Structure formats: C-alpha cells, structure tokens
Amino acid sequence: ARLHSFARCLMALRRLRVLRAERELNRQRDLEARRKRALEEAARRRKEAEALRKLAEEKAEVERRRLDEEAAEARRRAELEAEEARRGAKLATDAIRAQREADEAERRRREQRERAERAR
C-alpha cells in the first residue's frame, strides 16, 4: 500500500510538473502574441505618422507655391503701377514744358507787339 501511495505521489508530482510546463508554455505564447501585436501597432503608427508627414509637406508645398504666385502677381502689379506713374509724370512734365513754352511764346508776341506799337 505504501508503494502504491508513493507511486500515486510520483504521478501527482509528474502531473504538477506537466501542468507547470503547460502554464509556462501558455505564458510564453501569450507574451509572444502580445509582443507581435505591439510590433504591428508600432508599424501601423509609423505608417500613419509618415502619411501625415507627407500630407503636411504637400500642404506646405501648395501653400508656398500659392504665396510665390501671389508675390509674383503683386510684383507685376507694382511694376505696372510704377510704369503708369512714370508715364503720368512724363505727361505732367511735358504739359508743364508745353505750358511754359506757350507762356514764353505769348510773352514774346506781346513784347513784339509792344515794340511794334512803340516803333509806330
């Protein structure tokens, strides 16, 4: 009977060892599955971050182009306005010169007339 109970004891120990080994194996599998999920999640986040970065770069490029075009348009407008101002200034200068010449011609005619009247 003692041998029988000893054998039963050994069997129980062996079962315990098997259960412990199975539990350890399950724990290892669980850890491995968690690690794999964490790696997949990290990869997904990296992809997402990369896509967001690219999108932000594209937006910045579009905005930069738009600002460049606006600046070029403003430069063109300023050049046109400056050209118009130059033309306006030239017209004003020409008008002033013409007025002076007309005044000078009028003065000369008047002097000529006065000289002619005095000579008479």
Image (tube, rainbow, N blue to C red):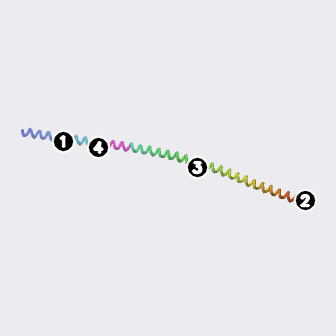
Instruction: Compare marks 3 and 4 and give the one earlier in the sequence.
Output: 4
Instruction: Compare marks 1 and 3 and give the one earlier in the sequence.
Output: 1
User: What is the spatial separation of the Cα atoms under label 2 and label 3, in whole angstroms?
Assistant: 68 Å
Residue ID for mark 2: 117
Residue ID for mark 3: 71
Q: Quadrant of residue 97?
A: bottom right
Q: Element under label 2?
A: helix
Instruction: Compare marks 2 and 1 and give the one earlier in the sequence.
Output: 1
The mark tally for this picture is 4
Residue ID for mark 4: 31
Instruction: Compare marks 1 and 4 and give the one earlier in the sequence.
Output: 1
Q: Tell me the magenta residue range.
A: 28-43
Q: Which amino acid is tagged 4?
A: Leu
Magenta stretch, main secondary structure class: helix
Q: Which amino acid is tagged 2?
A: Glu
On residue 42, the disc is none
Residue ID for mark 1: 17
Q: Element under label 4?
A: helix
Q: Is residue 44 above or below residue 94?
A: above
Query: How packed is label 3: few (under 14 Cα within 10 Å), some, or many (20 or more)?
Result: few
Q: Which amino acid is tagged 3?
A: Ala
User: What is the spatial separation of the Cα atoms under label 2 and label 4, in whole angstroms?
Assistant: 126 Å
Q: Which amino acid is tagged 1?
A: Arg
Q: Element under label 3?
A: helix
